[in-house]
Image (tube, rainbow, N blue to C red):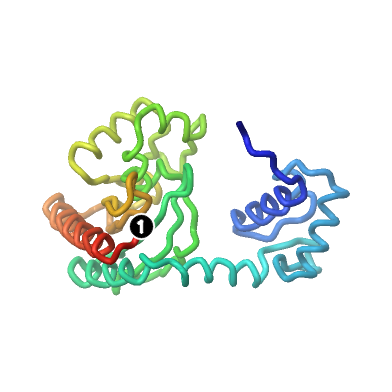
Amino acid sequence: MEPQLVKSAERTVRILEALAASHETLTLSELQQRTGFPRSSLHALMRTLVELNWVEADPARGAFGIGPHALLTGTAYLDKDPALPFAQQTLEDLRAETGQTAHFARRDEAHVIYLATRESRDARHVTPRVGRRLPAHVTALGQALIAQLTDDEVAALLPDPLLALTDHTITDLTKLTGELDQVRTRGWAYEREQGTPGVACVAVAVDYRIPATDAISCSMPARLAPAEVEKITDAVITHTRKLAATLRREGIR
């Protein structure tokens, strides 16, 4: 039985999610298009959210964006996560060994949320990743985590059609299911330019929960030779297994 949602609370959350997902501020009309909420109730909710600092208004454009209190809430989530300090150390160790960018992410239904990142020291352009939410099927992190589910669970979880971020994104469910079978067999996921052009990524699920909710990955230039990719894969496997053992030993679930 589906839980009954309080309409005003649901609308507030959907508004914040729409603003968070947009790279730019949104006008009231754009918000209405994205949420489908009546303009009258949307206007009242936005006025309240601005007053409480959850949303910032841009008077020049008549538009709105996420406010500082949303950041405080997200930071509180990270501060209270007992696994995160151990994962951050793992990312440091992984970057030191491979020289590549390392990520720690958690599955959120059909998406993954980045909780920590250590950028390659050679990175020319640092893209903020913490708090970023991406479709699970386009990332190695997400593929490593949805491979923990059965094919039927994956089909029920993912949207139809599957969103394409690049020309290499897998948008066919049958093809994705075949890829997830390979992930289960070899114990790690690998994607090449499925989420970002010019970038490849290898990921391993952190097995301290069943099914695993978290994963570690390394991003690398897609042009790297297979021998280099293999070395990085071995490093990700080793460090992720060590992290999982540490979390189990510490009693973190």
Name the residue: 25% across, 69% down: 95
Q: Could you tell whether 84 is left or right of 67 in the image?
A: left
The residue under label 1 is 253
Residue 248: x and y, percent?
26, 60
Residue positioned 36% across, 65% down in the render: 83
Residues 82 and 17: in front is: 82
Residue furthest out toward the right? 40
Query: What residue is shown at x 70% (from left), y 48% (from top)?
Result: 10
- SS of the residue under disc 1: loop
Closer to the camera in the image, 215 or 20: 215
Q: Quadrant of residue 250?
A: bottom left
Q: Quadrant of residue 166?
A: top left
- The answer to whether 39 is drawn above or below residue 88 in the figure is above
Q: Is residue 35 left or right of residue 158?
A: right
Which is nearer the eye, 73 or 169?
A: 73
235 versus 188 height, above or below:
below
Instruction: Spot the residue most to the front.
Output: 251
Residue 175 in the image, given as x and y percentages of width and height: 33, 28
Picture quarter with the N terminus: top right
**Above-or-below relation of 71 to 112:** below
Image location of residue 145, percent across then percent down: 35, 45
Label 1 packing within 10 angstroms: few (<14), some (14-19), many (20+): few
Q: Amino acid at mark 1?
A: Arg
In the displayed structure, does residue 221 sit left or right of residue 114?
Answer: left
The count of marks equals: 1
Work out which quarter of the rendered image holds the C terminus and state it: bottom left
Query: Which of the 4 quarters of the picture holds residue 119?
Result: bottom left
For image coordinates 65% across by 71% down, the residue present is: 69
Q: Residue furthest left?
A: 227
